[in-house]
Amino acid sequence: MAYLFKTVVTYFDKLEDRIRIRLSHKPIIYAIIGGIGIVLFWKGVWETAELVPILHGPGSVVLGTLILLLSGLMVSFFIGDSIIISGFKKEKKLAEKTENEVSIEQGKVDYVIAELEHIEDEIEELKTTKGHGRVDY
């Protein structure tokens, strides 16, 4: 039974990868299909919840809040991680930053990426010169 489950999961995982790759070349169609899928999913959740009498009104709010709090999604969904992190760092919101500040941050990010690429190149060079893929320390 576990083998069958793993086979089905693997099949759909690979199918999802192929579909996502093809749709990523057509972002508008991708957005439309994604929007329809999201709406239909939540429509199904809503209609299923209507079948359970306790999930009307306050019961729905209490259970939903409990699920979000226990799963750790309440804060990250409604506020967002970047807002929380920027608050800890006492940074300005992106909307409050000047064009110059955003440009400086982008420059720093570009510099870090360039440095990482340089380090990767050096590692590859070491691998090829030190025994065909083996690095001795």
Image: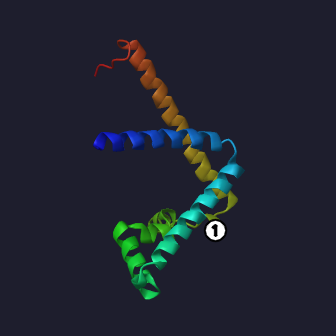
In front of the other: 106 or 38: 38
Quarter-of-image position of residue 61: bottom left
**Numbered-mark total:** 1
Count neighbours of disc 1 (C-alpha within 10 A) and say few if under 14, some if 14 to 19, many if 20 or more: few
Q: From the image, which quarter does the C terminus lie in? A: top left
Judged from the image, the secondary structure of the residue bearing numbered disc 1 is helix
Give 71 or 108, whichever is nearer the viewer: 71
Above or below — where is 16 with respect to 65?
Answer: above
Residue lying at 35% horizontally and 44% vertically, measured from the top left: 5
In this orientation, which residue lies closer to the viewer: 133 or 65?
Answer: 65
- In the rendered image, residue 102, in percent from the top left (x then y), is placed at 63, 56
What amino acid type is highlighted by mark number 1?
Glu
In the displayed structure, does residue 116 sit left or right of residue 107? Answer: left
Residue drawn at x 29%, y 43% as measured from the top left: 2
Location of residue 26 by image quarter: top right
Determine whether 63 is above or below 116 in the image.
below
Q: Closest to the observer: 12 or 23?
A: 12
Indicate the position of residue 36 as horizontal and vertical percent values: 63, 60
**Residue 114 in view here:** yes
Determine which residue is flagged by label 1. 96
**Viewed as shown, does residue 109 lie left or right of 71?**
right
Q: How far from the left and from the top, in percent, is residue 42?
A: 54, 68
